[in-house]
Image (spheres, grey):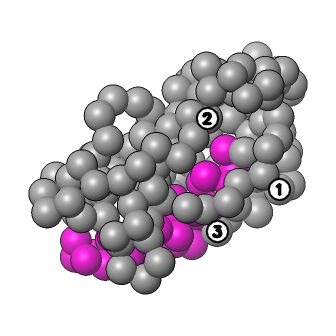
Amino acid sequence: PLELPESRPVMLAGTAGQEFDRAYDAYFESQCALAADLAPPPVALNTMLDSLSNLEMSAEVPDVAQKQIANARRSAVRMDGSLETAREAYRGVSHALLRAAVAARGPKSAQALTHYYCPMVPGGGGDWMQPGGELANPYGGSEMLRCGELVREMGRQGDMESGRVGVVETGFS
């Protein structure tokens, strides 16, 4: 699985927090589509790209998170196409958004965020996030729907259990 550093993510407030959660909601919608053997819906993909672009320009987003958001946007552009192409690009989006979530979160993504990993994904395994619920592998779809392992609960409950409870409020509401 992707190695992520222990950190205290910055809690983004106001517009930046809303955009962060909007990008992650679109990511989760894409994850559900891929798990159901469907290419990501164009509306979800466009929403993710729009939100990621807005976050790249936001002064409220920490530099380390902005770098990962830019990486996610570059990978997400490649998700438009066949199911196979979308799954290949999804790995880059997932890695970048996992790294961004270590540095910053929106109000919704701060509550529930789970990191999963499947060692069976060709090319070294595949990481992804879900907001909760039953594991649904986006890389294998119906062939490997429940294949994977819980790596880390990154939401509020997981942060409390690992001692990373304090989040810093930034920005204006």
Q: How many marks?
A: 3
Estimate the spatial distance between the alpha carbons at disc 1 and disc 2, rounded to whole Å. Answer: 18 Å
Residue 27, image x and y in percent? Answer: 43, 49
Estimate the spatial distance between the alpha carbons at disc 2 and disc 3, rounded to whole Å. Answer: 20 Å
Label 1: few (<14), some (14–19) or many (≥20) C-alpha neighbours in 10 Å = few
Q: Provide the residue span drawn in magenta.
A: 72-101
Q: Amino acid type of disc 3?
A: Asn
| Towards the viewer: 81 or 113 | 113
Where is mark 1, residue-wise? 64
Label 3: few (<14), some (14–19) or many (≥20) C-alpha neighbours in 10 Å = some
| Res 71 label | 3
Q: Main secondary structure of the magenta part?
A: helix
Picture quarter with the N terminus: bottom right
| Res 119 label | none
Callout 2: SS: loop
Q: Which residue is at 14% across, 63% downward?
A: 143
Estimate the spatial distance between the alpha carbons at disc 1 and disc 3, rounded to whole Å. Answer: 11 Å
Query: Toward which corner of the image does residue 137 lie, by quadrant?
Result: bottom left
Callout 3: SS: helix
Q: Is residue 87 magenta?
A: yes
Q: Is residue 51 visible?
A: yes
Callout 1: SS: helix
Where is mark 2, residue-wise? 154
Q: Amino acid type of disc 1?
A: Val
Picture quarter with the C terminus: top right
Residue 57, image x and y in percent? Answer: 75, 53
